[in-house]
Structure formats: C-alpha cells, structure tokens
Image: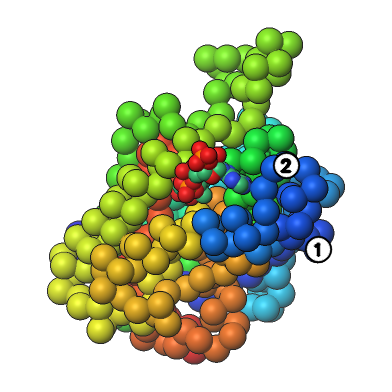
Amino acid sequence: MKDKRYNAVVTGVGMYVPERIYDNSYFEKIVDTSDEWIRTRTGIRERRILENGGTSVLATKAAEDLLKSKNLSPEEIDVIIVATVTPDMFFPATACLVQDNLGAKKAWGFDVSAACSGFLFAFQTGCSLVESGNYKKVLVIGADKMSSIVDYTDRNNCILFGDAGAAVLIEPTDDKKLGLQDSLLRCDGSGKDVLYMKGGGSANPPTHETVDQKMHVLFQDGKAVFKVAVKGMADISYDLMKKNNLSSDDIAYLVPHQANLRIIDATAERMGITREKVMINIDKYGNTTAATIPLCLVEYYRDGKIRKGDKLILASFGAGFTWGASFLVWGMD
Ligand code: UT7
C-alpha cells in the first residue's frame, strides 16, 4: 500500500439483528425442503427477519449501538458510508436516512453497492478517507434487508438469506502496525448473468410485466456461484497473505463472508487455516449480504475472542462479481 499519513484503525463496533426468527422448520412449511438439507448444504439453522421498515432501520440501530458503546455524540461523526444492495429506495441514499435518524449534523455520506463485498469495498473507502488525514471519524455500516428481495417460493434461494446491520468506526492512528494494512479488491461484471435482480433499475423500470416475470426478486444460480466463490475468495486471500509475507500461523482469524459453510470451509482449507481460526455465525443469521463480515467482527470482539494486535484476513465474494480480501490488525483492547 502507498505511503499514507495515518493508519486507519477500527475503534468501535455495533450491531443490530431483528428479533423475529425464521428457523429451518418455517421453510419446511412453505417450500419443499428440510432442516437436514439446509443444515448440511449451507450450515444455516435460522435467520432474522425485519418486519417493519427498511434497511435504514437496521443500519441506524447498528450505528446507535456503536455510538452508545463508545459514549460518542452523533455530531462527532464526519462521514457515514452504508454498504447495501437493499437501500430503502433508489434515492436519497440510505446513508442520508441514517444521518438524519442519528442526528449526525456534521456528517456527509453515501451508499456503496457491491453486494456481499459491499462491506469490504466501503471499509477500504472509509479507511482511505481517514488515511489521508482529511477525516477523523468515519462510520462504515454493512446492512441489508434481504427479505425484501427474496422470492419465498424459490427453495433454492429463500432459505439462504436474512436481515441484519453492523457497523465499525474508523479513526486515524500514528501506529503503523495497527489498522488496515493492505487490500486486494476486484470486480468482474461478466458474472452478471448468474446472480442478479434485474427489475426496477433504468434497464427494466417497474411495470406489471416486470412484476409478473419476478424481476424484482433476487436470482442466483447457486452452483455456478459456488465454484467461483471458493476459488475467488481463496486465491485473493492467499495472494494478500503472500504479498504481506504472512503465513497461516500469523493469522488470528479469517473473517469470511457468510454465504455457505461449505464455501467457508473450502476457502479456509485452501489457505491452510484451521476451523478454530475462522469466524462463523452463518448458523444464526444466514447470509446477510453486506452485514456478514462486520457482524462477525462485533460478535467475536464482544465475546473477548479478538485482541489488540491480532492479524485478521477479511474475505468476500458476491454479485457482480465482486470479491476481495483485506489485511487488518485489530486495534482495540
Ligand atoms: O453471497 C453471495 C454469493 N453466493 C454464494 O456464495 C452462494 C453459492 N452457492 C451455494 O451456496 C450453493 O450452491 C447452494 C446452497 C445455493 C445450493 O447448494 P448446492 O449443493 O450447490 O445444491 P444444488 O443447487 O446443486 O442443488 C442440489 C439439489 C437439486 O436437486 P436435484 O436437481 O439434484 O434433484 C436442487 O433442486 O438440491 C435441490 N435443492 C434443494 N433441496 C431441498 C435446492 N435447494 C433446495 C432446498 N431444499 N432448499
């Protein structure tokens, strides 16, 4: 990574998951599936569903949790970046809604659309703002209300997703050994035909036909995505470790996007990282798209499992395709 004025370090975390739980037995009642199939093929046992409101509710509550735990005033926040593919609406950006909900009167902000890699892309962006010395407190939130774009008659996909929001605060430090050290991020739009939601945008504005053709719900060719996800996530994580002279022994945790436990295991195996050093909570929340990685960070940190100085590799793969890995040294006691 190029010379920078400061390092960008995570100094606060927050999360929100809705109370309503859909466990696997719920899906046994609405589609032709079984708890056994879902658990063994995906690792998911249950997921949370937001009943009222949009993604801004998830993002705001995660940010409020962070501010409360840091005893921080919303007016101290300089920038709010929300990673999401389920914004409340096309515009205004969900970041603006969060700004207003929080009363973050001195902040500017915007949304990042990079699907399951949204958090990593937003995190890199937020860190760059801090590294330049121009901004001191940047809130990066990953939040998705996937239940708003899931077709609950499609057994291939409806069992996979859940709703959640999680946030990190990024601040500058002079200690170059802490915080974001390096990232490798990629996108490849040739993946657009296997994971998408085609309706509602400028190419296919909403009409009765687009609704009838189910163009306003997510489509995924799971098998096609599975193969590229394992290779994409493992290769880029391996390249990042090599570039930074890291062996698997140096890594405290791999923090992978939570799409499928089999993808997570295969990625870890290719990196030579054992299960104990992989953050996993897909069993409780399913795939929450932009929220999975920060949700893992919050839970593991609050459980006392991450310590200052721990080396983490954050890795993701998602629609676009988008994928990447970031090398982060944890900076909080
Ligand atoms: O987060 C963004 C990136 N997304 C991903 O990384 C997801 C990648 N893909 C996956 O995680 C997996 O491909 C899935 C979990 C989506 C599917 O698992 P799979 O092992 O690839 O299953 P499959 O699609 O090959 O389907 C195997 C069988 C099929 O039946 P036949 O054709 O063999 O008779 C499916 O129809 O399983 C059937 N099936 C189901 N059976 C029971 C598909 N969904 C279900 C279901 N319950 N919910």
Q: Position of residue 101 (x, y in %)?
A: 76, 53
Q: Which sits earlier in the primary sequence, circle 1 or circle 2? A: 1
Question: Mark on residue 64?
Answer: none
Q: 44 or 285, which lies in front?
A: 44
User: In percent of the image, x 72 and y 42: which residue is there?
Assistant: 31
- Left or right of residue 66: residue 188: left
**Is 66 situated above or below 149?**
below
Residue placed under numbered mark 1 in the picture: 19
Which quarter of the picture shows residue 225? top left
Q: Position of residue 253 (x, y in %)?
A: 39, 77
**Way the structure is coloured:** rainbow
- Residue sticking out furthest to the right: 52
| Mark 1–mark 2 CB contact (< 8 Å) | no
Q: 326 or 218, which lies in front?
A: 218
Residue placed under numbered mark 2 in the picture: 31
Q: Position of residue 313 (x, y in %)?
A: 35, 69
Query: Is the CB of the residue bearing disc 2 within 8 angstroms of ligand 1?
Result: yes
Q: Position of residue 293 (x, y in %)?
A: 50, 63
Q: Secondary structure at mark 1?
A: loop
Q: Amino acid at mark 1?
A: Glu
- The residues bearing labels 1 and 2 have C-alpha atoms spaced at a distance of 23 Å
Between circles 1 and 2, the one closer to the viewer is 2
